[in-house]
Image (cartoon, rainbow, N blue to C red):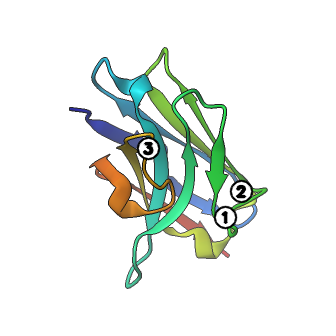
Amino acid sequence: QVQLVESGGGSVQAGGSLRLSCAASGRTFSTYALGWFRQAPGKEREFVAAIARSGSTTYYADSVKGRFTISRDNAKNTLYLQMNSLKPEDTAVYYCAAKSPYTEYTLAISYIYWGQGTQVTVSS
């Protein structure tokens, strides 16, 4: 069992930056692959970024590649998402999630545990 709690969301102007954190409980944090997803009003939840257990491999949606960076600190049981050059279309609730390392990284259905989400609002 893993419990995930996101933080770091907020309101920022276009071009600004935010850093999201996801704190996890449990001693098995390092056995899970992790991901960030987001959901805007009226839209389906979409993949943002994911990271392998060791942090050596990362995956990004094309829409955030080059602007967002996912990382993890297994000693601190924490996942991060550094978001730079934010755009109004990045506005959404952001969720962190954990899954087995053997399933598809970009599909929400692969993820077993989910946080409650944190709101990110980017104004133009």
Residue at image coords 35%, 52%: 111
Q: Against 64, is 53 above or below? A: above
Give the number of the disc on residue 29.
none
- Of the residues shown, which amino acid type is indicated by label 2? Gly
Residue at image coords 49%, 21%: 74
Quick one: 31 or 6, which is closer to the camera?
31
Residue at image coords 49%, 52%: 36
Q: Are marks 3 and 1 in contact (CB under 8 Å)?
A: no
> What separation in Å lies between label 1 and label 2 (alpha carbons)?
6 Å
Q: Secondary structure at mark 3?
A: loop
> What separation in Å lies between label 3 and label 2 (alpha carbons)?
35 Å
Of callouts 3 and 2, the N-terminal one: 2
- Of the residues shown, which amino acid type is indicated by label 1? Gln
**Residue 72 in the image, given as x and y percentages of width and height:** 56, 30
Q: Are marks 3 and 2 in contact (CB under 8 Å)?
A: no
Q: Against 61, is 5 above or below? A: above
Q: Which numbered mark, 3 or 1, is in the foreground of this view?
A: 3
Return the residue at label 1. 13
**Residue 15 in the image, given as x and y percentages of width and height:** 76, 62
Which quadrant is home to the C terminus? bottom right
Quick one: 12 or 60, which is closer to the camera?
60
- Of the residues shown, which amino acid type is indicated by label 3? Tyr
Query: Where on the picture, by quarter, is residue 86?
Result: bottom right
Q: Are marks 1 and 2 in contact (CB under 8 Å)?
A: yes
**Residue 58 in the image, given as x and y percentages of width and height:** 64, 44
Give the number of the disc on residue 16.
2
